[in-house]
Amino acid sequence: MSSTEYPFVPLEFSTYAEDEMLTRANEFYRDLSRRRSVRDYDDRAVPKEIVERAILTAGTAPSGAHKQPWTFVLVGDRDIKAKIREAAEIEEKENYTRRMPESWLKDLAPLGTDEHKPFLTTCPWLIVIFAQLWGRDEDGEKAKHYYVNESVGIATGMLLAALHRAGLATLTHTPSPMGFLHRILERPENERAYMLIALGYPKEGCTVPDLQRKSLEQIAVEV
Ligand code: IYR
């Protein structure tokens, strides 16, 4: 379908009384404020249907010219997860021992991260998000994509929120450079690995750093 052929249809939209809006906004904030990056996972299975529903939610994100320039690669296969872990740990070893400057290592120290990434094989599912730098039109010709980083970033945030809401723990992971994900997952030439998301149930007794989030005054200004 060419873009001029979208029919316009009536908007489906719900409005609420102001007190209900505030309650809804509060509830969503309270729920999302409990999301934490989890690095220790149980190997308990998670039904694929739940993860697929979260991916569908991510796919409702707005995107430049509605090109939807994303591919979510769902990895549950043990062997593929093992390959990803092996390659990621090689890159991360380089990162932690050579590539990252002292200042970066110092900033990361409170999080307790290192080059070992057991969650890549423990988690029941990994989702590798690929950004499509360009697409194909109906005739198979190269077609432009717009604001790809912004679009894929929004979809990724929505995916994290959807997985959290479903009751799953998540971790954003960027084992840079991520070219190995393209190779292992045999992605086409128009795609670049954008982010890896590990998900599942937290390991029993899992702890997280006692981080504080910035206040409204620190993150927002009214002009
Ligand atoms: N990719 C590495 C390093 C790392 C970088 C940042 I910035 C973080 O917030 C966390 C980790 C790793 O995953 O260990």
Image: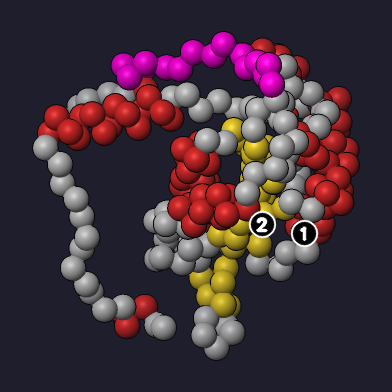
- Residue extending farthest to the left is 17
Q: Secondary structure at mark 2?
A: strand
Q: Residue at x 18, y 68 (%)?
A: 10
Please provide percent x and percent y for residue 216: 32, 19
Element type where label 1 sits in the image? loop
Q: Does residue 58 appear to the left or right of 9 in the view shown?
A: right
Task: Name the residue rendered at 48%, 43% in the picture.
Answer: 162
Left or right relative to 37: residue 138: left
Question: Mark on residue 45?
Answer: none
Q: Residue at x 65, y 28 (%)?
A: 202
Q: CA distance from mark 1 to mark 2?
A: 8 Å
> Relative to the observer, which residue lies in front, 28 or 131?
28
* Quadrant of the frame with the N terminus: bottom left
* Mark 1 lies on residue: 185
The kind of secondary structure the magenta stretch mainly shows is loop
User: Are there few (<14), some (14-19), or many (20+) residues within 10 Å of tag 1?
Assistant: some
Q: Amino acid at mark 1?
A: Leu
* Residue 93 rendering spot, x and y as whole percentages: 86, 31
- For the residues labelled 1 and 2, say whether their Cβ atoms are less than 8 Å apart: yes
The residue carrying mark 2 is 73
203 versus 61 height, above or below: above
Q: Dividing the image into four quarters, tell me where ligand 1 lies.
A: top right
Regarding residue 157, the answer to whether it shows in the image is no
Residue 5 at least partly seen: yes
Q: Which quadrant of the figure contains the C terminus? A: top left
Please tell me whether residue 146 is drawn above or below residue 95 in the rendered image: below
Please give the range of residues in magenta: 204-218
Residue 183 drawn above or below residue 109: below
What's the residue type where badge 2 is placed? Answer: Val
